[in-house]
Image (cartoon, grey):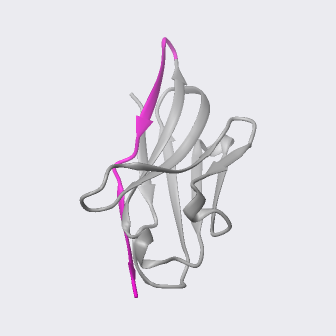
Amino acid sequence: QVQLVESGGGLVQAGENLRLSCTASGSIVGTGTMGWYRQAPGKQRELVGLILGGGGTNYQDSVKGRFTISRDNAKNTVYLQMNSLKPEDTAVYYCNMYIVTIGERSDYWGQGLQVTVSS
């Protein structure tokens, strides 16, 4: 059984930084694409950014230049460094990983972290 545990959310002021982490545990053979999504109140969940197994990244336009995704394959962990936060970044942030276990390949989600940016 695979579990994803997120950490690092909280309340910050506009212009400040936060770093989110998401670690997978269980009988993991390998990992593929990892990503971060967010959902603001009254809105649909949206992609923030992805990091491929080879390290390539892709970001939503609104966070380009401010957010950075990285990964540590040895630790089955993905990070989201968020700099120069804006009130419009306020949302619940979810990590997502494509994980290979013995006999199964599937997407898994973290529990969600509240990030609140005050103006």
- Seen in the picture, residue 117 relative to 1 is either above or below; the reply is below
Q: Residue at x 59, y 58 (%)?
A: 61
* Residue 114 location, quadrant: bottom left
- Seen in the picture, residue 94 relative to 19 is either above or below; the reply is above
Q: Residue at x 63, y 69 (%)?
A: 66
Q: Which residues are magenta?
A: 102-119
- Seen in the picture, residue 116 relative to 78 is either above or below; the reply is below
What secondary structure is the magenta-colored segment mainly?
Answer: strand
Q: Position of residue 18 (x, y in %)?
A: 53, 73
For residue 113: magenta? yes
Q: Residue furthest front?
A: 61
Q: Residue at x 52, y 76 (%)?
A: 85
> Which is more toward the observer, 98 or 90?
90
For the N terminus, the image quarter is top left
Q: Position of residue 95 (x, y in %)?
A: 46, 48
For the C terminus, the image quarter is bottom left
Left or right placement of residue 35 versus residue 73 in this view: left
> Which is more toward the observer, 43 or 102?
43
- Seen in the picture, residue 111 relative to 3 is either above or below; the reply is below
Left or right placement of residue 95 versus residue 30 in this view: left
Q: Position of residue 27 (x, y in %)?
A: 49, 26
* Residue 118 location, quadrant: bottom left
Q: Residue furthest left?
A: 42
For residue 64: magenta? no
Q: Residue at x 47, y 41 (%)?
A: 96
Q: Position of residue 19 (x, y in %)?
A: 55, 67
Count of numbered badges drawn on the protein? 0
